């Protein structure tokens, strides 16, 4: 049985890790390189770095940070934010990233998905989907948001997920705009709907507040991995505690 992955997420802007609520009200959470090294030592399965200011501010990604992290951390590293072209993707991979995550650029130019998959392999191409609930509880739908959650597109998130996989995406990073930073749990309906709609691994993101939430996303939401920030950044729980909790409940994890 494939093990489920625990992935700390480091949202970075202006050289610092930050955390907020629904992509706003950001507060400082530490140095990105030091945090990455700490999580590596703790036993994180992977790390995700998202330069959340790069696309809205129209600037390039944090290549220097990626280079520093890759010298100290030897687990898979996914980097997103500000990647607009094949050359941008190549530069980040050459800096030491194992995978790249794209959202806004893929919405505007879906061909970048197939081009990236052809040049670097599908395993390197992660599509980040920031999804916002678009209507009521009885008939849930979610729409894709871009520019770091700042703009809604009207694109159906489930249909977009299926399209990106058809184009060559090897993994999906699914973040609930509504749940992000709230610590009230992942959007399990959204996570399950996407997980059942595609054939590639889905990383659940947005809303982790306790270890039960991680379990629910993996079991009820059918995610292959869980992404979390606040509960790890502010030492509410450790990676060890998360893995122990999941293992005790029958979820296969890498020890």
Image (cartoon, rainbow, N blue to C red):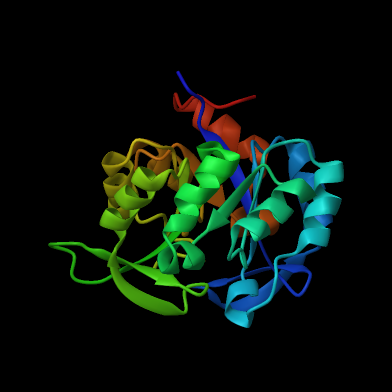
Residue 121, visible in the rendered structure: yes
| Viewer can see residue 10 | no
Answer with left or right where residue 46 lies relative to residue 247: right
Which residue does the image show at 63% across and 37% down from the upper left?
241
- Quadrant where the C terminus is found in the figure: top right
Q: Nearer the viewer, residue 64 or 248?
A: 64
Q: Position of residue 19 (x, y in %)?
A: 62, 68
Which quadrant holds the N terminus?
Answer: top left
Residue closest to the far left: 138
Look at the picture and state if 21 lies above or below 49: below
Report the residue at 25% width, 71% height from top: 134
Left or right for 135, reference 105 = left
Q: Please identify the quarter of the rendering in which residue 190 is found.
A: bottom left
Above or below: residue 207 compared with residue 114: below
Where residue 208 appears, x then y in whole percent? 49, 54
User: Does 67 appear above or below 5?
Assistant: below
Please determine whether, in this image, residue 244 is positioned above or below residue 150: above
């Amino acid at each position: 049985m494939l093990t489920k992955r625990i992935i700390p997420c480091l949202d970075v802007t202006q050289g610092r890790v930050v955390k907020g609520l629904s992509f706003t009200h950001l507060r400082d959470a530490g140095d990105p390189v030091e945090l990455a090294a700490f999580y590596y030592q703790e036993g994180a399965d992977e790390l995700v770095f998202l330069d959340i200011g790069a696309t809205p501010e129209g600037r390039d990604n944090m290549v220097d940070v990626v280079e520093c992290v890759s010298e100290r951390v030897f687990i898979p590293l996914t980097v997103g934010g500000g990647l607009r072209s094949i050359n941008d993707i190549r530069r980040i991979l050459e800096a030491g990233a194992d995978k790249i995550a794209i959202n806004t650029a893929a919405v505007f130019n879906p061909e970048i998905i197939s081009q990236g998959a052809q040049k670097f392999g599908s395993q390197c191409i992660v599509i980040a989907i920031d999804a916002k609930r678009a209507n009521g509880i009885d008939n849930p739908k979610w729409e894709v948001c871009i520019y770091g959650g700042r703009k809604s597109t009207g694109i159906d998130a489930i249909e977009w997920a299926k399209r990106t996989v058809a184009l060559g995406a090897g993994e999906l990073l699914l973040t609930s705009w509504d749940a992000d930073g709230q610590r009230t749990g992942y959007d399990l309906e959204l996570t399950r709907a996407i997980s059942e709609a595609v054939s590639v691994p889905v990383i659940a993101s947005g809303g982790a507040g306790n270890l039960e939430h991680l379990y629910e996303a993996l079991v009820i939401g059918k995610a292959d991995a869980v992404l979390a920030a606040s509960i790890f950044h502010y030492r509410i729980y450790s990676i060890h505690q998360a893995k122990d909790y999941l293992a005790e409940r029958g979820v296969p994890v890498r020890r």
